[in-house]
Image (tube, helix red, strand yellow):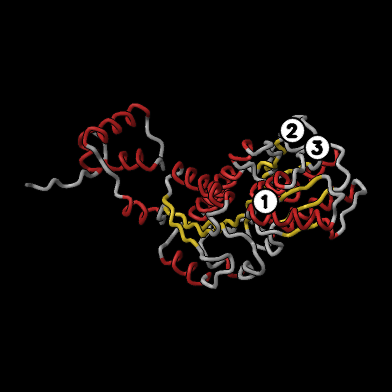
Amino acid sequence: MERRNPVTIVDVAMRAGVSPGTVSNVLTGKRPVAEGTRQRVQRALDELGYQPNLLARSLVNRSSNTLGVVAYGLEYYGPSRTLVGIERQAAELGYSLLLDLLHGPDSPDVDAVLAELSARRVDGIIWAVHEVGDNHSWIDERRLRTLPPIIFLTMDRRPGASIVSTDNRAGACIATQHLIDAGCRTIGIITGPLSWWEARERLAGWRSALEAAARDQSPTLVAEADWSAASGEAALRALLERRPDVDAVFACNDQMALGALRHCHATSRRVPDDLSIVGFDNTPESAYFWPALTTVRQHLAELGRLAVNELHRQIEHNLETSEPLTPVLKVLQPELIVRESTASMQSATSQPVIHAR
């Protein structure tokens, strides 16, 4: 069977009665083309079944149309949901993704991962690895200048680093304030592992709200867990043994809140009559807990989309000029979703806001 040669822009130009350069301008959008001519070229493209040579285009544009995504913790709701937003926005902008999953947040393979992504000529990198311990100590301005553009997710500020994050401290503060407004007197907290930056930020938000209201924030009200439902159950048990006067708990994710609810059911403690509970994440299942869980909504898919958009802006800037870009910090504001697990049933009024600095 005779093999058909690929359709070229010369073939398209002949069919449309234009120059190959005009076809190229229609495909790339680099120069304006009259609408009538553009439509004629598009008809020729469709009729001939033209398929662009992405490799050749990437060589011309000095772009691979590929983003590297380095991630950890996809078994958790937050990272997996954020990756959905990354994938959708990358596809919309015409990027493919090269995903590299680390085995742990403190993986020693950072150098190898960065070298591999650079060797594959990715246009940019999204570093979606939680800040745990000193696992981000490798980040410094000098090193970042030798790498493709990088956007970091959910970490503390660092010189030279562009970061897209959720305001974890504000989320914890509005959760705790809600419990204060509901009339709760002694409010405990179930934290995630305090080696995680997010867990420390949520603890700080809890403390800030209690301090402003002149409420007890002693260490006896803090129970550390590991993000799992089982650890949430054990943490509430230990917390109530230390402080039986606790009448409300802020659990720093919905899974730990689920474990806390289980302990309440097992000990005939009524929620919210005896104990109010607030979670964090607004997982899809949280509305179906018993009782339905009041929680803090993170806009996780939007976080992923925002990271891709910012990375795309930096990539386009680097293609056009050698002038360095000022690092950015963009923070998404969470919002409170009030349900039956807390005494107050007033609707949440806070709205998400993006802060760009």
- Location of residue 288 by image quarter: top right
Give percent across and percent down for residue 128. 56, 57
Picture disc at residue 273: 3
**Is 120 placed left or right of 207 in the picture?**
left
Residue plotted at (62% across, 68% down): 135
Asked if disc 1 and disc 3 are in contact, CB closer than 8 Å, the reply is no
Q: Please name whichever residue, 68 or 159, is drawn nearer the observer in this view of the structure.
A: 68
Comes first in the chain, label 2 or label 1: 1
Residue lying farthest to the top in this orientation: 36
Query: Which one is nearer the viewer's eye here, 173 or 66?
Result: 173
- Residue, disc 2: 348
* Left or right of 97 in this view: 136: right
Position of 286 relative to 164 (above/below)? above
The kind of secondary structure element at disc 2 is loop
* Number of other residues with Cα within 10 Å of mark 1, as a class: few under 14, some 14 to 19, many 20 or more: many
**Which residue lies under the disc numbered 1?**
256
Q: How far apart in space, not on screen, are marks 1 and 3 (Cα)?
A: 20 Å
Amino acid carrying mark 3 in the image:
Asp
Q: Quadrant of residue 326?
A: bottom right
Q: Residue 126: percent from the left, percent from the top?
A: 53, 56
At label 2, the amino acid type is Ala
Residue type pointed to by label 1? Met
Q: Which residue is drawn at 72% across and 34% down?
A: 340
Q: Is residue 115 visible?
A: yes
Where is residue 97? Give x, y as percent. 44, 53
Q: From mark 2 to mark 1, how far is it between C-alphas?
A: 22 Å
